Amino acid sequence: MVIRVRRKSDVASSEITPKEVYVNRRDFLGRTGGALAAAGMAPLVAEPVRPREWRQEAHVAPPADYGEELRGELNPYDDVTEYNNFYEFGTEKDDPYKHSGDFEPRPWTVEVGGLCHNPGKYGVEDLVGMGEIQDRIYRMRCVEAWSMVIPWRGVPLRNIISRLAPMTDAKFVAFETVYRPQQMPGQQRNVLQWPYVEGLRIDEAANELSLLATGLYGEDLPNQNGAPLRLVTPWKYGFKGIKSIVGITFTEEMPPTSWNISAPHEYGFYANVNPNVDHPRWSQARERYIGKGLGRHPTLMFNGYEEEVGHLYAGMDLREWY
Amino acid sequence: MTRKGRVRLLKTGVWLLCLTPLAWVSYRFFLGDGLGVDPVLEFEHWSGLSALTVLLGALSVTPLRRLTGFNDLQKVRRVVGLFAFFYVTVHFAAWIGLDQFFAWAYMGDDIAERPFITLGFTAFLMLLAMAVTSTKGWIRRLGKNWVRLHRLVYVAGVLGVIHYLWATKADDRWPFVAAIVLAVLLGSRIWWAGRRRRPKQGVPARKPRVPGSASALDVVGTIRTEGPGR
C-alpha cells in the first residue's frame, strides 16, 4: 500500500485551474494584463501579456540530466527558435528563423587541429559518439540584458576534449563557424568579421557545464539555433555560444573572438555574466526574462552558476578581464 | 477648391500620415505577430523609431515649404511637432511601465549613468517644454523667447539621433540614415541662412533675417488663421 504524504507544496485539487481557462489564459491576460500593469499591480501580472498562442504542449522537453529544477521556467519552443542573435542570417531577431531555410546542416565536417594528439576531420556523429548524450536545462543570458531558459541536448565538451587529447601547452580552445554566404545571407555584409570565431580557456572548456549541443527540446537543432553543432556555456553571455561549428583548434595563445574584434571596449574574451561589470553603454545589473511578464530581474553572478564555475576565476579581476 | 478647403485637406492628410505608425503597431499587435517573442523591446523600438521619424518630419516642413513654395505647409508644423512629442511620450512610458516596470531608483540610475538614456531623457524634456508652450496663450506670454525656446527642436533632433545610435548594438545602418537625413535638414537651414544674408546683384538688400525663426507675431498670425481652439 502506498501512503501518500501531503506536502506543503502540493496543490489542492480544488485549486487546479480548469484546462480551458489555463489554455486560454494568455488571451485573458492579454486583455486585462495591460490594464493591470498600467495600474501598477505588478504581482498580478506574473504571466506574459502578449496574445500569442500557447503552443508549449506541442514540444515537451525530455527529463533533464541537469537543471530539472528549472523546468517550470522553460521558454516555449517558439520563443527559443524564433528569437535569435545569429547575424549570419541577418541582424533582426526573427531573421535567423525567417532566412535559414536554405541552410544545409548535413553533410558536416569539423576540422580539429592545433596542439592536440588527435587532429583530423570529424563528422558530427563522431564527436557526439565521444561522450554521453544528455538533456540539460540551462539559463541563457544575452549581453543585451534579456534571458531565456532552454532545454539543450548535447554532449559534455569535456568528454570530447579528453578524446581529442590536447597537448600540455594547449591553454585555449578556439572555435570557428562555417562561412557560407550563399546559404547565410547575413554573411554578405560585414556587420561582423566572418567567419565568426570564439574561444575558451581550456579549463573553461573542460568545466562540467560546457556543452556541445546538437539539439534542443529533444529534437535536432533548428538551423537558426546553430545546427548541427553549437557551444553552450551558460555562465557566459550568449555570444560565447558559437554556432554551426566547423573548426576546433587547440592553441597556446588566447584566440581572437568576433565580438571583441568588433568592439574591443564592449566585449571581452571571458564575457562572464556579471551584474557588477556593466557594458559601457548599458547596465548589466538587471535583465528581462523573455516571455515572463513586465519589468526586470536582478542578474545573477555567473548567471547563477557560481558554484560550478566560480573557482575558475579565483583571484582574477573580472572588471579587467571582462 | 477654396483655400480653406485645401488647408483642411492638407491637415487631414498630415493627421492620417502621423497616425500611420500607430495603425501599424496596432495591426501587428492585434492581427499580426503580436509583436513577436519580445513585445516589450519591439514596442520600445517601434515607438522610438516613430518618434524620431515624426520629429524629422517636423524638421522637414519648413525646407519643404521653401522648396515647393506651398506656404500653407507652415500651418502643419505644430501638429507634426505634437505628434512627435506624443510618440516620444509613448516611448518613454513604455520604458517606464513595460521595460523597467516602475523601478524608479533603477531608472534614476540609468538616466544619470547611461549616456544614451541621459540624452533621450533630455530630448524628452525639450519636447515636453515645447509641447506645453505650443498654445496661442504661451506664444503671447513668451513673445520673442518663444522662438528661442522652440529652436530646441533642432537640439532634440540631434540628441534623438545620437540616442538611437548609442542604443544600437551593432547594426548601425538605420541610425546612420537618420543622421544623414538630420544633417541634410539642418544643413539646408544653414544654407538658406547664408542665401538670405547675401543680396543678389541689382536687388536691394533685404532686412537680415535668420530663416526658421519666424517672429512670434508671424507665428501668432499663422495660428490665428487656423481658427479657434486649434
Image: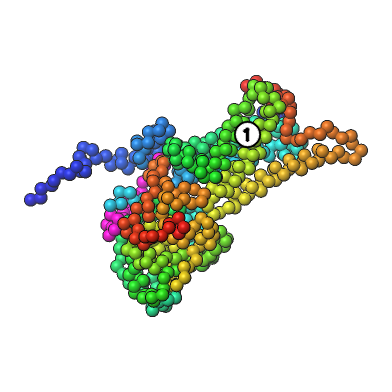
Kind of residue at disc 1: Gly
Say which residue appears at 48% left-offset and 68% top-offset. A255
Q: Which residues are magenta?
A: A48-68
Between A251 and B10, the one lying in front of the other is A251
Q: Which x, y percent locates residue A82? A: 44, 53
User: How is the rendered protein coloured?
Assistant: rainbow
Q: Is residue B18 visible?
A: yes
Say which residue appears at 73% left-offset and 25% top-offset. B217
Say which residue appears at 41% left-offset and 70% top-offset. A171
For mark 1, give the secondary structure: helix
| Magenta-drawn stretch, dominant element (helix, strand or loop) | loop
Q: Which residue position holds label 1? A: B81
Question: Numbered disc 1: what chain?
Answer: B
| Horizontal relation, residue B229 to residue B112: left or right | right
Q: Residues within 10 Å of mark 1 (few under 14, many from 20)?
A: many
Specify the quadrant of the image occupied by residue A44. Answer: top left
A57 versus A50 height, above or below? below
Between A183 and B48, the one lying in front of the other is B48
Q: Is residue A225 visible?
A: no
B219 versus B88 height, above or below? above
